[in-house]
Image: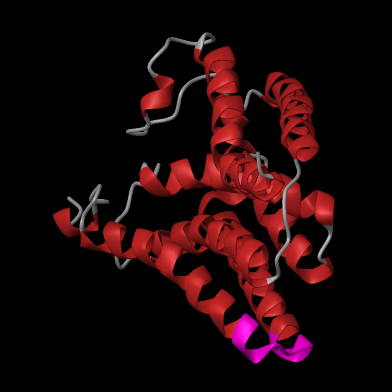
Amino acid sequence: GSMPTSEFQFLGIPHITAMLLTVITPVVLSVLVRKADSPTVTRTLCYTLGGTLLVNDVVHWCYRLATVGFQEFVHEYLPLHVCGLTVFATAFALFYRNQILYETAYFWGLVGTFNAILTPELEVGFPKYRFFQYFITHSGIVIGVLFATFGMRMRPTFKSLFRSFLILNGYTVVIAGFNLLLGTNYMFLCESPDTKSPFFFAPWPWYIPILDGVTLMFFFVVYSPFLISNWIRRGP
């Protein structure tokens, strides 16, 4: 059988380390960029972060294609989950400082991807390749989004909260059609994932509208710091 050490350990030291790095890295990078106050340093960091996300993705596709073959790749590993799309949104938001991509990455990344970091759907542990790949993708999204927010002072708007939610729902409908055509389970629309996440407690298909509502609620939660700071600035 396989070595027991290869199993992913929920809240084991590697998991906790990955979570800490997810929070500490953007803080350090943001301080660095603000202190340096140099367009070159900012640009270099943006390209490094975005580039790391994209390269990590492409290497993972090659790895999966080589190990599982084309058919299973299409079935399981196309970048059609929310996190897969958010990788692109984050990377290109960093490259081009595009507001709509940034806002989408902000809401999708901080809500969806953050959940994936807390309760990973991961079958292997540290130091396997897939462990690194998983956390570079998911932590990388959160790091990129927080860096854009604090390092580059990009901001989501109240309107973008609803726009990101509508885009997500439109995308969900498209993926539902894709799943029906190909018999796949992208975005876990056909059955729930094998994860410790508490949000899949209801049976199919009820967890889908429940998740939708929970998602909107969390969009408000991650937007709340800006809501509160706007209120404070406006004063009584």
Q: Position of residue 75 (x, y in %)?
A: 61, 36
Residue plotted at (36% across, 41% down): 119
Location of residue 122 with respect to 127 vertically, above or below:
above
**What residue span does the magenta drawing correspond to?**
34-41
* Screen quadrant of the C terminus: top right
Dominant SS type (magenta): helix
Q: Can I make out residue 124 in this image?
A: yes
Residue 100, image x and y in percent? 82, 49
Which residue sits at x=81%, y=65%?
97
Q: Is residue 33 above or below residue 206?
A: below
Q: Could you tell whether 37 is left or right of 225 in the image?
A: right
Q: Give the answer, above or below, for where 32 lies relative to 229.
A: below
Residue 20 sits inside the magenta stretch? no
| 187 to 93, vertically: above or below | above
156 sits left or right of 71 in the view: right
Residue visible at 68% across and 69% down in the picture: 50
The one of 60 and 2 positioned closer to us in this rendering: 60
Please tell me in which quadrant of the rendered image residue 181 appears: top right
Image point 57% across, 84% down: which residue? 32
- Of all residues, the one furthest to the front in this rendering is 236
Quadrant position of residue 94: bottom right
